[in-house]
Image (cartoon, rainbow, N blue to C red):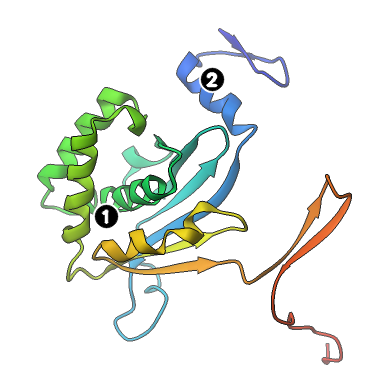
C-alpha cells in the first residue's frame, strides 16, 4: 500500500510503477496532442465521425505520450515514456498513431504484434527499447501510411516541443497538419501578471450587435 505524495491518502492496489507515474503527473504539463482520423478527400480537417483516437504529450521531468482515447479499449490510457530528445518525441507520437490505426484493421499488421511484445518487455518505457527495434518501427511507419486515407493533426501548445518538429512529420507518409499557437494570454505567477504572446490583432466582439 502506498501513500499519495500530496494528499497523504493511502492508495490501495497501486503498484510502485503506477505510483511513480501518478507522482510525476502532478508536476507535468500537457504540451501537445495528436488527433487521428480520416482526412477529408477534398478539404482540410477531418471527416466527421472518423476519429480513431487522440494522443496527449506530457512533458515534465520525463516526456511521455498517453493514448487518451481510442476505438480499441485495450489501448485506452496506455502511457509510453519517451526519450526527452525532441525528434524522438515526435517519432514516438507518430509510431503510436500508427498503432492506433493498425489496431482497428481486420488484417493485423505483423509489426503491430511485434510492437506490443516489445512494449510489454519494457513496460511502456520506450527509452529502454532496443535502438534497432525502435528504428524498425519508425521505418515501417514512415512507408506504411502511403496512399492511406488516414490523417494526423498535431497541435503544439505554447512552448511545446512539437512545434519545432515539422521535419519529422515530413519524413512519414500519412497526411498531416501541424498546428501551433497564433496568440495567447497566459497568467505568470513569476511575473504576477498576464503575458501576451503572438502577433496579429485578436478579433473583437466590441461594437457587434448582441
State if disc 1 and disc 2 touch (CB < 8 Å): no
Q: Is 97 placed above or below 15 here?
A: below
Q: Position of residue 6 (x, y in %)?
A: 71, 21
**Residue at the spot 24% in from the left edge and 39% down from the top edge:** 134
Please, what secondary structure does the residue beneath circle 2 have? helix
Give the spatial CA distance, label 2 vs label 1. Answer: 30 Å
* Residue 26 shown left or right of residue 78 in the figure: right
Note whether residue 50 is visible. yes
For the C terminus, the quadrant is bottom right
Tell me if mark 1 has few (under 14), some (14-19) or many (20+) residues whose alpha carbon lies within 10 angstroms of its own.
Answer: many
For the N terminus, the quadrant is top right
* Residue 204 shown left or right of residue 75 in the figure: right
* Residue 4 shown left or right of residue 106 in the figure: right
Which circle marks residue 2 in the picture?
Answer: none
Please, what secondary structure does the residue beneath circle 1 have? helix
Q: Is 3 placed above or below 164 here?
A: above
Q: Position of residue 14 (x, y in %)?
A: 51, 16
**Closer to the camera in the image, 135 or 153:** 135
Which circle marks residue 101 in the picture?
Answer: 1
Q: Is 121 placed above or below 157 here?
A: above
N-term-proximal mark, 2 vs 1: 2
Tell me if mark 2 has few (under 14), some (14-19) or many (20+) residues whose alpha carbon lies within 10 angstroms of its own.
Answer: some
Q: Quadrant of residue 198?
A: bottom right
Q: Position of residue 142 (x, y in %)?
A: 21, 57
Q: Quadrant of residue 130?
A: top left
| Residue identifier under label 2 | 19
In the rendered image, the residue lying farthest to the right is 192
In the rendered image, the residue lying farthest to the top is 1
Q: Position of residue 38 (x, y in %)?
A: 31, 69
**Residue at the spot 58% in from the left edge and 10% down from the top edge:** 2
Amino acid at each position: 500500500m502506498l501513500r499519495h505524495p500530496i494528499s497523504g491518502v493511502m492508495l490501495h492496489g497501486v503498484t510502485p510503477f503506477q505510483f511513480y507515474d501518478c507522482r510525476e503527473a502532478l508536476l507535468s504539463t500537457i504540451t501537445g496532442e495528436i488527433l487521428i482520423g480520416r482526412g477529408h478527400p477534398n478539404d482540410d480537417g477531418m471527416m466527421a465521425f472518423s476519429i480513431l483516437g487522440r494522443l496527449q504529450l506530457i512533458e515534465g521531468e520525463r516526456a511521455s505520450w498517453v493514448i487518451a482515447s481510442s476505438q480499441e479499449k485495450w489501448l485506452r490510457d496506455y502511457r509510453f515514456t519517451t526519450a526527452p530528445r525532441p525528434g524522438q518525441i515526435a517519432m514516438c507520437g507518430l509510431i503510436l498513431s500508427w498503432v492506433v490505426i493498425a489496431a482497428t484493421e481486420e488484417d493485423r499488421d505483423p509489426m503491430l504484434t511485434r510492437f506490443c511484445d516489445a512494449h510489454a518487455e519494457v513496460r511502456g518505457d520506450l527509452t529502454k527499447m532496443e535502438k534497432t527495434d525502435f528504428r524498425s518501427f519508425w521505418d515501417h511507419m514512415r512507408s506504411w501510411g502511403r496512399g492511406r486515407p488516414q490523417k494526423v493533426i498535431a497541435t503544439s501548445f505554447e512552448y511545446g516541443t512539437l512545434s519545432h518538429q515539422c521535419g519529422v512529420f515530413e519524413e512519414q507518409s500519412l497526411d498531416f497538419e501541424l498546428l501551433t499557437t497564433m496568440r495567447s494570454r497566459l497568467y505568470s505567477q513569476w511575473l504576477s501578471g498576464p503575458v501576451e504572446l503572438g502577433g496579429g490583432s485578436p478579433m473583437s466582439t466590441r461594437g457587434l450587435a448582441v
